[in-house]
Image (spheres, grey):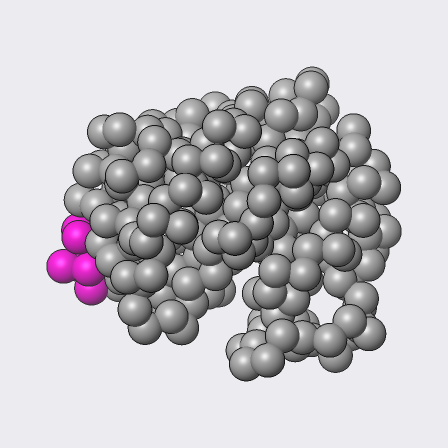
Amino acid sequence: MPATKNNRGVDAHAHVFSAQAPAVPGARYRPPYAAERDAWRSQWPAAGITHGVVVQPSFFGCDNREMLDTVASDPRHLRGVAVLPPSIDDATLKRFHATGVRAMRLNLRGVRDYAEYSSAAWRSLFDRAHALGWHVECFIDTGRMRDIVPALEPSPVDVLFDHFGAPGARAATVDATFEAVRHLARTREVWCKLSGPYRLEGGDPREHARRWHDAVGPSRLVWGSDWPWTGFEGDQDYASLRMRLADWVDAKVERLALWDNAARLYGFE
C-alpha cells in the first residue's frame, strides 16, 4: 500500500454510535448494533490511517451527543461533522467548534423538496458556519446536485458532497451534476468525498473521480471509509476500500486526498 505523507492519513467519513440511543421518528434505517470508536480505529493501522472524522448519522437527527463525546475523547486525532437545526444559537455553535466540529451536514437523501434550505433561517446558519471556518456537507439523492445549489449559492460557505456527489449513471445526469459543481465552485471551495462506491446508483467510481478532479482540482478531494457501511454491512472491508482509492486516482492525488487535503479541511496539525 502506498505510504501516506509522513505516515499519516485521514478517514474523513465514519459513523460512531451506540446500540441503545433511539432513532428520530421517520429514520430510514437504524442499525441494531453498536459501532464503537475503538472498533473503527482498530482498522486504521493496516490501512495507513491515523486520524478520523466522525459524521453524525442521519438516524440521530440533531442529537449530536454521541458524536461530540467521541470527538472529545481524542481531540488530537478526531474531528466531527454535526447535523443542526437552523435555530441553533451562536453559543452552541462555538461550543461545538471548541469540541472539534468543523462542518455541518445536510442529510438530503429522500427529501423531496429542497426549497426550505433557501429560507432566511438556513441562509443565516450557513453564514454563521462560514464565519467559524466550517463547510456544509451534503448527502444528496442521485442527480439532485442542481436542486441544492440555489440554496447554497447565496452564502459564501464552502461545500462538500458525500459519496462522489451521487452523479448517477446516465450521461445527461452526470453532465448536469458537474455543470452544477463548476458553477458553485466559481464562488467558493467545493469538495468531494471519494467514499461509498456501493452507494452509487450506477456509474464508474474511477470516472466520477476523474470528473471531480477536472471540476475542482486535486486539492479538493478527500477519502472516507463510510464505516460501518450502514445498510451495506457484511459486504465491505475497511482495508480493501482504502486500497480502492488507488484505482480511482493517481499516487500523487492519493497522498493529497489522504492527508494534505483532509488535514487542511478539518484542521489537523
Rendered image quadrant of residue 234: bottom right
Rendered image quadrant of residue 173: bottom left
Q: Residue 88, how many percent across, how many down? A: 57, 49
Work out whether residue 73 or residue 49 is closer to the camera in this orientation and state it.
73
Secondary structure predominantly adopted by residues drawn in magenta: helix
Work out which quarter of the rendered image holds the N terminus and state it.
top right
Q: Residue 128, how many percent across, how many down? A: 48, 35
Q: Residue 237, how many percent across, how many down? A: 66, 59
Asked if the magenta segment contains residue 173, the reply would be yes
Q: Is residue 185 above or below residue 144?
A: above
- Judge from the rendering whether residue 133 lies leftward or rightward of residue 31; answer left or right: left
Work out whether residue 164 or residue 85 is closer to the camera in this orientation and state it.
85
Q: What number of labels is visible? A: 0
Q: Is residue 151 visible?
A: yes
Q: Is residue 246 visible?
A: no
Work out which quarter of the rendered image holds the C terminus and state it.
top right
Q: Is residue 10 above or below residue 5?
A: below
Instruction: Magenta stretch: give its range.
Output: 170-177
Residue at 63 percent across and 21 percent down: it is 5
Q: Residue 179, how many percent across, how many down? A: 18, 44
Residue at 25 percent across and 58 percent down: it is 147
- Judge from the rendering whether residue 149 lies leftward or rightward of residue 246; answer left or right: left
Residue at 82 percent across and 74 percent down: it is 20
Q: Is residue 126 above or below residue 266?
A: below
Asked if the magenta segment contains residue 25, the reply would be no
Instruction: Please identify the residue farthest to the left as the structure is shown.
Output: 172
Residue at 76 percent across and 42 percent down: it is 71
Work out whether residue 227 or residue 24 is closer to the camera in this orientation and state it.
24
Rendered image quadrant of residue 80: top right
